């Protein structure tokens, strides 16, 4: 059966397919509630299209169960699996802004949000050469504010880059030069 257990989906609707005996009805349950039914084709293949996943269910961890039922009503043991509906974190840099000066301790602040409530880990970086090379300041931070001690860096114009990851997807944002 496709998709495989523990797969990750980025679309809210998926296709589920597999094979079963031709003389049964195939039933798909999503999160124990939504039910889809079909009959296999002559070669035993079945396909469910537009199967809706729930982003709000268990942080996007949807449970799929597929079983067969014969004409007498006897059901097979269900094949179950989990499929995570994931959205990449949303991220924007709040500070520093264009025209700000990096001196002493400069705050790099972001707004970070994950639609399916996964924990968001932040990597903070700066570049003194327009983004060709980046210096990592912090990795895996949970705080949306980072205090950058600029005294260890040369004077000049910088870019700040922040990467936000939820363990499944990563998003990045780059500030304007400051």
Image (spheres, helix red, strand yellow):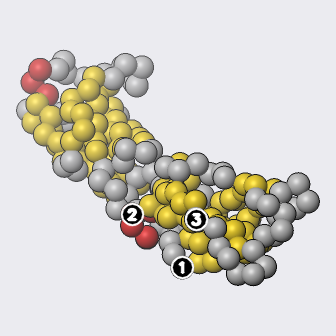
Residue 1, position as x, y percentages in the image: 66, 52
Q: Quick check: 152 above or below 148?
A: above
User: Alpha carbon of mark 3 to alpha carbon of mark 1: how far?
Assistant: 15 Å
The answer to whether mark 2 and mark 1 are in CB contact below 8 A is no
Helix, strand or loop for disc 1: loop
What residue sits right under mark 3 in the picture? 78
What residue is shown at x 49% (from left), y 49% (from top)?
6
Residue 47, position as x, y percentages in the image: 77, 61
What residue is shown at x 39% (from left), y 63% (from top)?
59
Q: Mark 2 or mark 1, which has the lower sequence index?
A: 1
Residue toward you, 155 or 122 = 122
What residue sits right under mark 2 in the picture? 59
What residue is shown at x 45% (from left), y 44% (from top)?
169
Q: Mark 3 or mark 1, which has the lower sequence index?
A: 1
- The crowd level at tag 2 (other Cα within 10 Å; few <14, some 14-19, many 20+) is some
The answer to whether mark 3 and mark 1 are in CB contact below 8 A is no
Residue toward you, 95 or 59 = 59
Q: Quadrant of the C terminus?
A: top left
- Displayed quadrant of residue 101: top left
What residue sits right under mark 1 in the picture? 33
Q: Quick check: 91 above or below 153?
A: below
Evaluate whether residue 157 shows in this view: no
Helix, strand or loop for disc 3: loop
What residue is shown at x 58% (from left), y 65% (from top)?
77
The answer to whether mark 3 and mark 2 are in CB contact below 8 A is no
């Amino acid at each position: 059966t496709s998709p495989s257990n523990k797969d990750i989906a980025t679309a809210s609707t998926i296709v589920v397919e597999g094979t079963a005996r031709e003389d049964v009805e195939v039933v798909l349950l999503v999160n124990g509630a939504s039910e889809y039914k079909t009959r296999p084709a002559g070669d035993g293949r079945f396909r469910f299209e537009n199967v809706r996943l729930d982003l709000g269910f268990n942080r996007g961890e949807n449970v799929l169960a597929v079983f067969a039922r014969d004409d007498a009503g006897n059901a097979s043991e269900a094949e179950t699996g989990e499929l995570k509906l994931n959205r990449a974190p949303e991220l924007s840099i709040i500070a520093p802004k264009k025209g700000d000066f990096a001196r002493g301790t400069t705050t790099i602040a972001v707004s970070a949000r994950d639609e399916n409530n996964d924990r968001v880990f932040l990597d903070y970086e700066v570049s003194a050469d327009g983004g060709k090379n980046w210096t990592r300041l912090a990795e895996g931070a949970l705080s949306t504010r980072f205090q950058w001690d600029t005294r260890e860096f040369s004077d000049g114009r910088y870019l700040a880059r922040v990467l936000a990851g939820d363990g499944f997807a990563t998003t990045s944002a780059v500030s304007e030069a400051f």
